[in-house]
Image (spheres, helix red, strand yellow):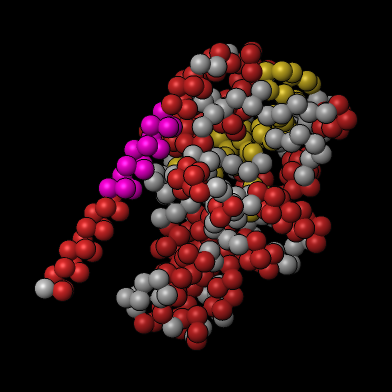
Amino acid sequence: MRKQRSFAVTVLRAAAGWCASKLEYAAILVLEGLLRVARRLDPRLYSRRARLKAVRQGAAVKPDGAFLIFVFYATGPLPGFTRTFIDAVARSPFNLILVANAPVENSLAADLLSRCCLLIERANVGRDFGAYKDGIGVLMERFPGVQRLVIANDSVFYLQDGLDSLLRALNGSEDFIGVSEVYDHHYHVASFLQSFSRRVLTSAAFRRFWENYRPIGTRRWAILKGEGALTSALLKAGFRPHVLFRVSMLRSRLRTAGDLRVLKPLLPPAIYDKIAGTAEPDLPELIRRRFARAAPEESPAVADAITNRVMATNQLHGAGFLFWRFMGLPLVKRDICYRGIHTLSQVASILSPVDAAARDEILADLERRGDGGQIPIVLRPLYHHGII
């Protein structure tokens, strides 16, 4: 009888938890819908002219038909990691189009105009994807013969080593090039760095997407109706993404990693716990003892366990530091602490080989943003469902 009562209580608690989670999610969807309705009342949503504050001609115009639109938000001096990216673009064949989602001070504008082809200032309507839409519209009107276009934003820290090589890869021959991909909820190519050929730029799918896209400024809209919908439109049009940093490539590197103890500090704690067996004790014994013994013959099994876990996530979150260490990816997501992927102390330890000034600036930015634990409890549901 006692066992039956205990079982019934367990079932009731599970059912109550399931119902509570569904009600919470329904409330989140209602809130998201209300936010979208409110944004639709903004007349700037329907007029690029109303969003644009200024379009200024820069001095750095290159003869090549390659262009790079970089979206940034800065109310003061530019961060060093943003300047690192601008410097790398200056060394590349790309004509730089800067799109600012905040007013640019005169002294900074003068500096930027000496380093770019165009400087566009706009109201911060529609986040990065809204800025992409306006930047692409202005670019296509002024330079209709664009042969290659890269879109980029400042949602990542740009590291010096490997950045020139990455820009060369983005100027490749493939029609649709991405740096990373996401399988979390739905598949899409991450939009912080994407590259498109002339064939894509002149395609009906690409033009139609940007003509129809409304720059509504919620995070879920930008992800689902922005980067997700753009990838979907290009896939349907027959453009297969060439992703530069894929988990399948990482798997082969990890299988020959040698001493696997170096992997532990590079993994997000949530993934490490599952692979090490602390979260799922039913994992094979070979994987459970892996971090304690680090035997070389276990490399393939551990590599498979890691990459299988990463495959179903935002891959730059799940394996960003593995890509950096083993494949030379010169990027780190700026939200890795805010989203609870890594701790600040873990990032500090991982980035110890990086230039001290660059590392200190990255850590200061991460600390300023904080993490989910600092969010008031009443806002936690919004955080967990990606509203904030």
Identified at 36% across, 72% down, the residue is 280
Q: Name the quarter where the N terminus is drawn.
A: bottom left
What percent of the width, then of the height, locates residue 189? 49, 43
Magenta-highlighted residues: 19-33
Give the answer, above or below, for where 202 lies relative to 245.
above
Give the answer, above or below, for where 27 lies relative to 142.
below
Can the viewer see residue 11 in this picture? yes
Camera-side residue of 287 and 35: 35
Camera-side residue of 344 and 9: 9
Q: Residue furthest left?
A: 1
The part of the image, by quadrant, that contains residue 343 is: bottom right
Relative side of 104 to 147, left or right: right
Camera-side residue of 8 and 160: 8
Identified at 73% across, 67% down, the residue is 352
Based on the picture, tell me whether residue 56 belongs to the magenta stretch.
no
- What is the magenta segment's predominant secondary structure? helix
Give the answer, above or below, for where 128 lies relative to 3.
above
**Number of marks drawn:** 0
What percent of the width, then of the height, locates residue 354? 75, 62
Relative side of 272 to 107, left or right: left
What percent of the width, then of the height, locates residue 101? 68, 29
Can the viewer see residue 210 in this picture? no
